[in-house]
Amino acid sequence: MTYKKIILAGGNGYLGGVLADHYKDLADEIIILSRKTKALNGHIKTLIWDGQTEGDWANELEGADLLINLCGKNVNCRYTQVNRDEIVASRVLPTALLNRVVTKLQNPPQLWINLSSATIYRHAEDRPQDEETGDIGYGFSIDVCNVWEKTFFEVNIPKTRKVALRMGIVLGLSDSAFPRLLNLVKCGMGGPQGDGKQYMSWVHEQDAAKCTEWILQHPDLNGVINCTAPVPLKNTEFMACIRKAYGIPFGLPSPPWFLKIGAIIIGTETELILKSRWVIPKRLLDSGYQFKFSEAEHAIKDILSISK
């Protein structure tokens, strides 16, 4: 199936590259809204925006099949007040801006997918969390997700279907969490982090892209949708999968006290490692979506095969 136009707001990062690669042979035109200029790459065009003010880029949204908003400061940082403010603003302001712009369009995008996060659910070791029965957690990360989704859904745009995609940890070789976990394995530190009982809800980058197209093709899907593989693993099991795939039989554990010190040194928060995210993509599964990579073992082997 060929699409006329795909818009990737804030699409100059890792996930934007994954999505652009997925749609490059499926769309006549891909437009990336970015703060940085980039040369024309075939039918992939980059337009400058600041995520806060309207500009000529707004006209390009007319007639789009799909708008995906990926804007958001990386949460892999210390939660200082300055960083907290930037994390919130970098999500809320572009979302509010796009609401204002899309509302004015004569022929707005058919579907608008706004990125969210699976971390919105509580720390869960007792049962999985899905869109219908999951419990919203508490704390800064959850507050961010709540205001992000509230800003997105508070404006009703009759001609545009809206989906908040609660994304798990995206697995790929070039960026995100996987290269960092792989480096721990290579250094002999690939054992469990903390007690290792926390669940990791992940998704292979190919499924992260494919599910956006699935949602586009299924007009009955709207609202909140989890984007995680159907078989999450505990941290101990996940790290064992990486070690096995890479051929390293052992890995030293990282106790909580060690992680706290390390987090301060590298400028991050232990929550990103120790929170148990046991999230299930119930709505995608109920709609018939078949994950290309359901098992972490297969996903990890596929990612590692790219580097060989």
Image: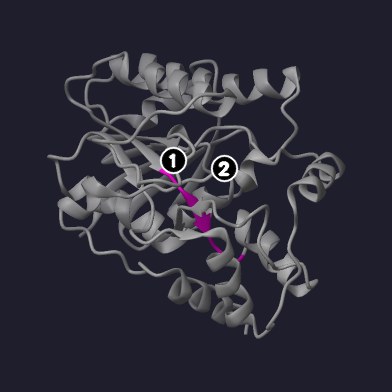
**Kind of residue at disc 1:** Ala
Which residue shows up at 62% across the image and 43% down it? 272
Q: CA distance from mark 1 to mark 2?
A: 11 Å
Vertical relation: 117 (above or below) 147: below
Do callouts 1 and 2 mark residues in contact (Cβ within 8 Å)? no
Q: Position of residue 51 (x, y in %)?
A: 54, 23
The reply, left or right, for residue 286 in relation to residue 151 is left
* Secondary structure at numbered mark 2: loop
Residue pointed to by mark 1 = 118
| View extreme (left): residue | 220
> Which is more toward the observer, 4 or 84?
84
> Which is more toward the observer, 129 or 256?
256
The reply, left or right, for residue 200 in relation to residue 89 is left
Marks 1 and 2, the one that precedes in the sequence: 1
Residue pointed to by mark 2 = 275
Which residue shows up at 45% across the image and 32% down it? 120
Quadrant of the frame with the C terminus: bottom right
Q: Position of residue 92 (x, y in %)?
A: 50, 20
The reply, left or right, for residue 192 in relation to residue 223 is right
Magenta residue check for 299 = no
Chain part drawn in magenta? 167-173
Which residue shows up at 68% across the image and 68% down it? 182
**Kind of residue at disc 2:** Lys
Q: Quadrant of residue 244?
A: bottom right
